[in-house]
Image (tube, rainbow, N blue to C red):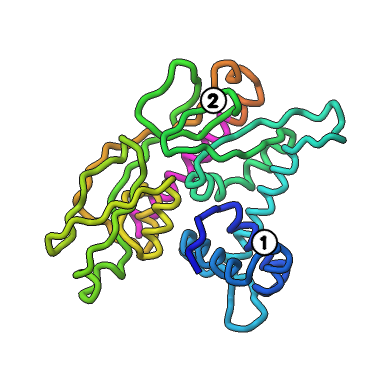
Amino acid sequence: MDQLKPDIWRDLAVLLAVGEAKSSFGASRLLGISNDAVEMRVDQLETRIGAALVNRSTPRWVLTDAGKGLVEKTRSIVNLVERGTVGEGADKNTPVPLVLSCPDLFFEFLLLPLWYRIETKLPDIPIKLETLQGVTAKPDSTCDLALCLGRAGRADTVGAKIGDVRFALYAHRSLLGSNTRANTPSHFTVEAAELNVPDLVWPGGKTTRRVVCNDLLSVVTAVKSGRGIGLLPRFIGDNDPVLVPLEGADVAPLTLSILSMRGNAAKPEVQTLRTLLAREIARVLDDRTIGAQQG
């Protein structure tokens, strides 16, 4: 069976179903997908998280402590998203949800760890989450706030700088073994001028094969699964024990910002959410940097 395209929303939905059904077959019936797809989604999620989420030693699957923690965070997100869904039967006084856009990579590694705090601190502000396409995409008129990565701002946006994101080249430890070092790996990358590096030469003199991915999350997934090397944010790579930093790529830091279009920036609820997100995400970045240095 071909590898499924990484999709954090579908992967989390499968984990929730596994926790409810207590088996891959039960989860497949709940979701209307194959048993193989359930197992592959769980595999992909465990690879990205870097921990076992499900104990599969018996036919009855049981969530590990890491799996239970992720399910709890996921349910808090689901609750928040449901608050931001205004149906046809909604009361006319129901506030219109704020639309928060961000790349899947930032949702998983930056928003997910703090979303419970966002939900509890802003219980009366409905929020709708949307995926921001592209590594360095900027907000448009369809969203109120966007978590963006880049070097240059735009005159029609207002926001706050959260911090600098540094990148480094990483490989899975398994690629550096004596038996595998002779095989030239693929170099996973994205179509973004800011993250463009020359073709890389693997020990032995062979140039790596470039594979262009749609987003950084796909690059992270490929590198963490041992399928090749790639340029990753250091707050991810330095905190994963299976990843090893490599030389050969020098990329200037990119600025992580929380932005909104000028027409939306003055809304009090937008200002409140922007301030809270900037503070909480900066704290997550600091914790990951300190953890990596101590490790």
**Magenta segment: does it hold 186?**
no
Residue at the image position 63 percent from the left and 62 percent from the top: 14
Q: Main secondary structure of the magenta part?
A: helix
Q: Amino acid at mark 1?
A: Leu
Judging from the image, what secondary structure is the residue with disc 2 in? Answer: loop
Q: Is residue 169 left or right of residue 122?
A: left
Residue 251: where, in percent of width, then height?
26, 40
Q: Identify the disc placed on residue 188.
A: none
Considering depth in this image, is 258 or 59 the residue closer to the camera?
59
Residue count near mark 1 (Cα–Cα under 10 Å), binned few <14, some 14–19, many ≥20: many
Residue at the image position 54 percent from the left and 25 percent from the top: 140
Residue count near mark 2 (Cα–Cα under 10 Å), binned few <14, some 14–19, many ≥20: some
Residue 108: where, in percent of width, then height?
52, 50
Quarter of the image for residue 61 reads bottom right
Q: In 3D space, how far apart are the residues under numbered discs 1 and 2 (Cα atoms)?
A: 32 Å
How many numbered marks have been drawn onto this rendered protein structure? 2
Residue at the image position 43 percent from the left and 20 percent from the top: 154
Q: Which residue is mark 1?
A: 16
Above or below for 154 versus 72: above
Residue at the image position 64 percent from the left and 47 percent from the top: 116
Residue 225: where, in percent of width, then height?
40, 64
Residue span colored magenta: 274-295
Above or below for 27 versus 234: below
Q: Which residue is mark 2?
A: 140
Instruction: Give the mark toward the camera: 1 or 2.
Output: 2
Q: Amino acid at mark 2?
A: Asp
